Amino acid sequence: MELRLYDTFTREKRPFAPLDPARVRMYVCGPTVYDFAHIGNARPIIVFDVLFRLLRQWAKEKGWGDVVYIRNITDVDDKINARAAEEYPGLPLNEAIRTVTEKTEKQFHEDVDALGALRPTLEPRATEHIAEMKTLIERLVAQGCAYAAQEHVLFSVASMPDYGKLARRTLDEMMAGARVEVAPYKRDPMDFVLWKPSKPGEPAWPSPSGIKAPGRPGWHIECSAMSWKHLGETFDIHGGGIDLVFPHHENEIAQSRCAFHTRIMANFWMHNGFLQVEGEKMSKSLGNFFTIRDVLADWPAEAVRLAMLQTHYRQPINWTEAGLREAQRTLDHWYQLTAEVGPGMLCADVVDALSDDLNTPKALAAFHELRAEAAKGTQAAAACLKASARLMGLLQHSAAEWAAWRPRSLAIDEGKVEALIAARNAARQAKNFKEADRIRAELDSMGIELEDHKDRPTTWKVKR
Ligand SMILES: [Zn+2]
């Protein structure tokens, strides 16, 4: 058995082996911290979390060293500046920016922890790597891959003959995408910003390349700098959403390869597909825009994870309530079946499927067989199911914890539920069935389902 991954750069599935078996190195582009992460952002978090878990499993099997997973935090960006000025008009801009980025980073961590994602090995912040970015910029200028003009530093795309190779775009296609009005400091419309001057009050650092005015880095250079610092000049896997292929990853490759004279930046480029909601593009104007937080208020996190993994990561995903409901039902059953067993052996079919370019739908199909066996009372199958599900970040709770989950929107006051049940019992004893029915209806509207028993007191559960 071998691990095979699809590489966007070569457009092929290839066997994976780490460049340096002592350290498996993966970099994934992380969030720009100015607002709640949306459900589309949850996809790379979950996909690369499953890959991280799988790589650790392979590292254990093969005797590779640690799996180092880096996910950066972009904390310098025009969107952050705009949000800070809007939200905290009374504060000096830099203080407002710090408030926004710290708050958003905290929210992001709460969300990804809630999704059951393992924390990456390191989450470097852009503003803590300005020195590395400047070193890279100076190097690119010295090598003729970049130039300073009107207080900007730009990467010269003409210096990189195979620019566009990752995206497989022709020069004409890329030109069409470049802004119609070309900034006067660009030699070529395709050239992109490595450094730019800051407006008064904005975050600013002393500029590289002899530029007098203080400035700040462009977005692309931060990932080249942080992956270099923490993973080296080349590394194993670079991941992100498909929307990052061009221009972000194309530009990262150009910067890193020119700076280090390497043939590659990463050995594998992996990209997850788009997410649509109920068959439509998610957008605030369509009213189908959901943050991770919104979704986790109504659904247990593992249902979100399972629903996400039903689609292969490279395919576009159609995010539906029906899919979530089905995932929740599946998990209800899995939790029931595995309540009494500890995790056993990993199911070979599940590991095989995951090792085939993270084929999660195929892995989940293998679960159905395990479930059928476990339902017949085969303990070993139940134990395999539990271990294999955990490899995908599922079945991480106890059956009791899972059963006790309540939607946050349905804030249940347990004391009130018990009091209403007592009142209903009293009404029934007094043969006031109209009142008893009224109370049952009231509980029903609170999302509570009652179960009357012949031999013991009434029990209740939250309707799903
Ligand atoms: Zn990046």
Image (tube, rainbow, N blue to C red):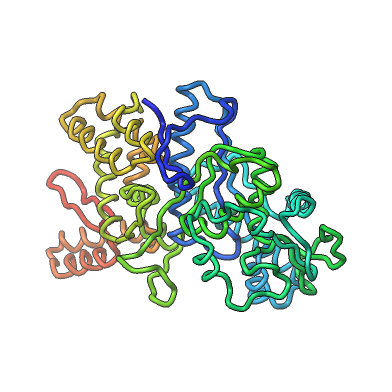
Left or right of 141? Residue 422 is left
Residue 122, percent from left and from top: 62, 42
Between 4 and 408, the one nearer to me in the picture:
4
Residue 348, percent from left and from top: 31, 27
Between 226 and 446, the one nearer to me in the picture:
226
Name the residue rendered at 64%, 76% in the picture: 86
In the picture, which quadrant includes the N terminus? top left
Name the residue rendered at 25%, 59% in the picture: 322
Residue 145, percent from left and from top: 71, 54
Left or right of 124? Residue 172 is left
Left or right of 255? Residue 305 is left
Relative vertical location of residue 47 with respect to residue 407 in this rendering, above or below: above
In the picture, which quadrant includes the C terminus? bottom left
Name the residue rendered at 68%, 54% in the picture: 126
Name the residue rendered at 63%, 69% in the picture: 189
Left or right of 15? Residue 72 is right
Tell me, yes or no, if residue 413 can be seen here.
no
The image quadrant that residue 446 belongs to is: bottom left
Residue 64, percent from left and from top: 53, 24
